[in-house]
């Protein structure tokens, strides 16, 4: 027996392109406009000005160590002549991670409160995390053509599972006595969520956000194969030209971007928890 999933998926993709082309075009235009705006904002000031601003933000969020690390990471991208590509990658990751968290966070809270929903989501998430990441690029490219849009869509799909899983785990791990205490003093469900459950779940949420950022960066590198630009394109260029120096410089720049985003997001969430 021979089973070809493409025989079923291809007609669905063709039907989507034929019947939802205006909606898909709007989605594509919105994503490109948001990405272009963020890239323009990052590239507007001189590099040393943006480095100084990020260093100040790092000090406010995480102290001296975060300040030094943020400054060193961005300075490396600047010195290695990868500033524009780094800003493109940061913009793409910010958009993809923001949408991934926006999808996974409320769905994870809902799954934590309803075990049947979690039971339905669990096998779906298992499949999503097991499928090789570049497979997501195939339908995204077929629907949205080459460029940054399929890269963002594929990155969102790849970044949702870890954030959703860890959000469910975080809110399910909140001690029951804390929630009962909030109910006993007459707090509203929304107040209990934001004042009790969210601070208690923050350590696990930090891990989920970290995994979402790292997986999104990994997907961004693969997205360089479909013309997404950024550091992924530099890695792809180094591979196709067999230039080990270019590939290594771009790879280390990706590490620098990952460290930067991880420390800033960690500092922001931990600062909220302390507050």
Image: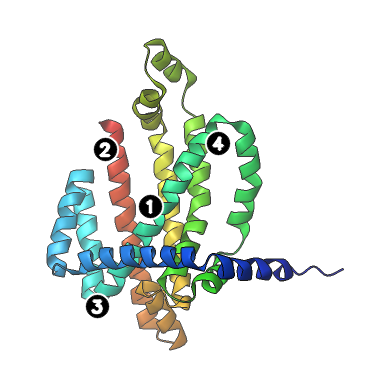
Badge 3: residue crowd in 10 Å (few <14, some 14–19, many ≥20) = few
Q: How many angstroms separate mark 1 from mark 3 (CA)?
A: 27 Å
Q: Earlier in the sequence, mark 1 or mark 3?
A: 3
Dot 4: few (<14), some (14–19), or many (≥20) neighbours within 10 Å? many
Q: With respect to residue 177, does 195 lie above or below?
A: below
Of pointers 4 and 2, the one earlier in the residue sequence: 4
Q: Which residue is drawn at 52% across and 35% down?
A: 110
Given this view, does label 4 or label 2 mark the residue nearer the observer?
4
Q: Residue 271 carries which label?
A: 2
Q: How far apart are marks 3 and 2 (CA)?
A: 33 Å
Q: Which of marks 2 and 1 is in front?
A: 1
Quadrant the C terminus occupies: top left
Q: Mark 3 points at which residue?
A: 81
Q: Residue furthest bottom?
A: 241
Q: Element type at marker 3?
A: loop
| Furthest-top residue in this view | 184
């Amino acid at each position: 027996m021979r089973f070809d999933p493409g025989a079923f998926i291809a007609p669905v993709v063709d039907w989507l392109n034929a019947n939802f082309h205006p909606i898909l075009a709007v989605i594509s235009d919105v994503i490109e406009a948001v990405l272009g705006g963020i890239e323009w904002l990052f590239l507007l000031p001189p590099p040393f000005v943006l480095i100084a601003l990020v260093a100040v933000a790092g000090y406010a969020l995480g102290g001296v160590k975060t300040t030094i690390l943020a400054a060193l990471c961005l300075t490396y991208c600047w010195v290695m002549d990868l500033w524009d590509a780094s800003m493109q990658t940061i913009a793409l990751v910010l958009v993809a991670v923001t949408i991934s968290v926006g999808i996974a966070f409320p769905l994870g809270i809902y799954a934590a409160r309803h075990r049947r929903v979690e039971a339905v989501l669990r096998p779906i998430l298992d499949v999503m995390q097991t499928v090789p990441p570049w497979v997501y690029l195939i339908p995204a490219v077929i629907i949205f053509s080459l460029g940054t849009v399929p890269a963002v869509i594929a990155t969102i799909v790849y970044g949702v599972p870890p954030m959703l899983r860890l959000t469910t785990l975080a809110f399910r791990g909140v001690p029951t006595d804390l929630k009962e205490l909030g109910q006993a003093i007459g707090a509203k469900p929304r107040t209990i969520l934001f004042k009790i459950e969210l601070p208690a779940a923050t350590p696990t949420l930090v891990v989920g956000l970290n995994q979402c950022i790292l997986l999104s960066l990994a997907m961004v590198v693969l997205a360089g194969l479909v013309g997404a630009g950024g550091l992924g394109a530099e890695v792809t260029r180094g591979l196709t030209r067999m230039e080990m120096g270019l590939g290594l410089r771009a790879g280390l720049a990706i590490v620098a971007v990952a460290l930067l985003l991880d420390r800033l997001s960690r500092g922001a969430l931990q600062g909220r928890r302390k507050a």
